[in-house]
Amino acid sequence: KKQGTVSRSSSEAEYRAMAQAASEVTWLVRLLEELGIHDLTPVQLHCDNQSALHIAKNPVFHERTKHIEIDCHFTRDKVLEGLLQLTYLPTSDQLADILTKILPGPQFQHLMSKLGMVHCTDHSSLRGGDEPAALFTHISAAAQSLFQ
């Protein structure tokens, strides 16, 4: 989701994203509790930025964090309430990166395996029996006909 403000640091950007996630988790937990599902807390929220985790876990006001808006401290409040448990997740294990970044082959394969996906060398198509090159030629011809 696009943020409505400009962050001054990567820690602030991560902290803002954590605040958004904390808000959504709070809403979901309250909804499930109203439906009779209890014992849902603490919800683990993973973050790969240790500075953002430190800001959220430490209730002491820091001179370096004074530019972070008060409403972003929502995450810290939810941690203190016991609703959230913040945990560090190394960048190399960040599953979202596979959807948002260009990754080196080994890291891409590692994250694909964590998602339960495997590399398939079979290039079958819905047309049946087409070789990959023939299929590409067919798709290219179809795409070109759209622009004529």
Image (cartoon, rainbow, N blue to C red):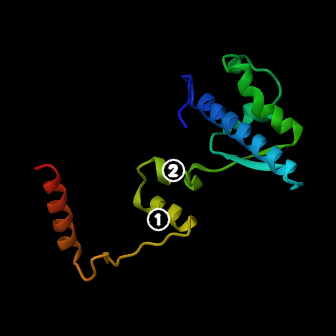
Residue 143: x and y, percent?
A: 19, 56
Which residue is depicted at the point 82% across and 32% down? 77
Which residue is farthest bottom? 129
Q: Quadrant of residue 95?
A: bottom right
Q: Residues within 10 Å of mark 1 (few under 14, many from 20)?
A: some
| Residue that numbered label 1 is attached to | 109
Q: Identity of the amino acid at label 2? A: Asp
| Residue that numbered label 2 is attached to | 97
Mark 1 secondary-structure assignment: helix
Nearer-N-terminus badge (1/2)? 2
Residue 112: x and y, percent?
A: 50, 64
Q: Report the side of 5 relative to 127 (left or right).
A: right
Which numbered tag is attached to residue 8? none
Which residue is depicted at the point 74% across and 44% down? 25
Camera-nearest residue between 72 and 66: 72
Which residue is depicted at the point 79% across and 21% down? 61
Residue 59 to residue 145: above or below: above
Mark 2 secondary-structure assignment: helix
Residue 36: x and y, percent?
A: 88, 54
Which residue is depicted at the point 86% across and 56% down? 37
Q: Identity of the amino acid at label 1? A: Gln
Real-space CA distance between mark 1 and mark 2, rounded to the nearest whole angstrom? 12 Å
Whether residues under marks 1 and 2 lie with C-beta atoms below 8 angstroms apart, the answer is no
